[in-house]
Each structure stands twice: as structure tokens, then as C-alpha cells.
Image: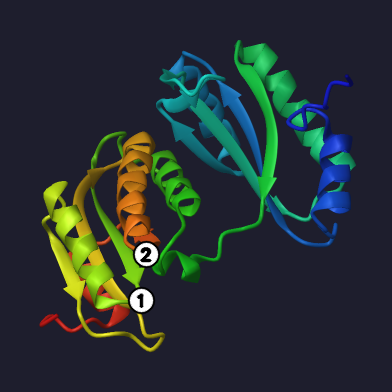
Amino acid sequence: MTDQPDMRFDIDALFEHMTGNLGHELQNELDWNFSLQSPDFQALQNVADELEPEYLVQLHESIQEIDSEGNHSEGDPLLCVIQRAALTPDEVKALANRLNVLAEERGLSYEGVSCYEPINEEELLGWQSLDDACWQLRNATGSGLELNAELPWTFLVVVPDLDGMQNIARELEALGFDDRDDYHEPDEQGLLGVCAFVEGRNNEFDLRETTEKIRQVAERHGGQLEGIQFYTRDDMYDVFGVEEDV
């Protein structure tokens, strides 16, 4: 059996996968994320200060790590160095080499490179998938929001019939999701809804766990989780134009 290349470090394999399997065109911009890790937070902070004039830097005091058996643990601080550009393989290799050398000089661990399409900021206002919501949490942490800081979570469930909506609302109530808006009138697509407001926090593991509970309730009664946001009730009303007498 042939070992698969680790595309965090094999730049040629990464580009081959992107262009051959994902349809990426080299003239399109991506967010290139180069990662450095160390138990020494101050050492990462020093590097972040040096690189900030050139790149977007995100410094995480800790990260959630998941092993092969699905167990969660708290990992060492992580520095993400991000460049938004249409880079060639040689340009990515040059930047990876620069950061790898810097890591060796400072006693840090270079953790490789990943890339993703730039997030459309307008889309962040709408209902997000779980993965996008977790990305937003990581971005907020990198921008200075403390891990486990209080943060409102809002979940929207949609369902095609009144019985399903009422059953979802009752089961969520029994599970402790008692701060809700239950929408008895169908929207333009003929769907009813349940919107749950949760006193959450900046913790990706907790968000995933809560999302899974709500998703399972929705699907048991013929509904689905439409999305997640980090809104208070007032924020949600303002963004989506919801009347307060629901």
C-alpha cells in the first residue's frame, strides 16, 4: 500500500490535488494559512509581531486537538500566518521555506500549510453551517477573543409541518432549550421554524456538541438544522427583519 503524501508539506501534491480534483484555477486568490506551534506563547507572539506588517496573523492561546480515536485534548498555542493571493507552487514553497527556517531558529514547530477560499463577509451575516461557524470562532480567537468567553449562539431549525414544529419545540424545551421563538406561520418556502437562543461561549467543542443535540432533535421530527449564528435575539431581529411579536 502506497503512503499518501502529506499535503501540508508536499506543495506539489497539494497543487495537483487542487487543480486536478477540485478544479482550482491558479489565477484565483486563496487564503494560504501557514502554521507554527509551540508551548511557548511568548515566542509565537514575538514572531507574530515581526510578521504582522506583511501578513495577517492569528495567534491562538490553545487549540482543540482530536486524536485518531476521537478523543479531545487541549493543544499548544498556534500561530497562523495568512496571505490572501493567487500564489504559484514556487511562491508557496518559498514562503513555506522562510517560515520553516524561522521556526527552526526560534525553537518552534512548523506545522505546514493549508488553503481555502476567502470567506465572503456578507455571507457571515446569514445562517452558517457548523464548519463555517467553527471557522468564525477560530478567527475570533485569533483576533483576541478569549477561549471560553461568553458568546451568544442562535440555532434555526426548519420543518414543513405544524406537528413537526410543535414536537421539535417540546423536545428542545425538555432538553433545556427554553429560550426560543417558535414560528407557527410558514415562510415563503412553506416552512415553519424554531429558533433557539443559547448562552454559549467561545468553545468549538461545546458548539459542535450542542449543534449535534439540536440537529438530532430536528431530524427525529422531519426537520433540519438550517444554520447557526452568534446573535442575541435583538441582533437576529435586526439582521433578518423579524417582527418582535412572533
Residue at 89 percent of width and 36 percent of height = 12
Three-letter residue code for mark 2: Gly
Label pair 2/1, CB-CB below 8 angstroms: yes
- Is residue 4 shown above or below 30? above
Above or below residue 167? Residue 207 is above
Label 2 to label 1, Cα distance in Å? 8 Å
| SS at circle 1 | loop
Specify whether 203 is left or right of 163: right
| Sequence-first disc among 2 and 1 | 1
Give the residue at mark 2. 222
**Residue 208 location, quadrant:** top left
Q: Is residue 229 visible?
A: no
Q: Where is residue 4 in the image (x, y as percent from the top left)?
A: 82, 26
In percent of the image, x 30 and y 77: which residue is there? 161
Left or right placement of residue 28 versus residue 35 in this view: right
Residue beneath disc 1: 160
Q: How crowded is mark 2: few (under 14 residues within 10 Å), some or many (20 or more)?
A: some
Number of marks in the rendered image:
2
The image position of residue 240, as x and y in percent, is 31, 78
Q: Which residue is drawn at 31% across and 37% down?
A: 206
Q: Is residue 40 left or right of residue 162?
A: right
Judged from the image, the secondary structure of the residue bearing numbered disc 2 is: loop
Residue 195 marker: none
**Which quadrant: the C terminus?**
bottom left
Q: Position of residue 39 (x, y in %)?
A: 47, 13
- The residue positioned 20% from the left and 52% from the top of the image is 198
Between 84 and 224, the one lying in front of the other is 224
Mark 1 crowdedness (10 Å alpha carbons): few <14, some 14-19, many ≥20: some
Residue 121 visible, this orientation: yes
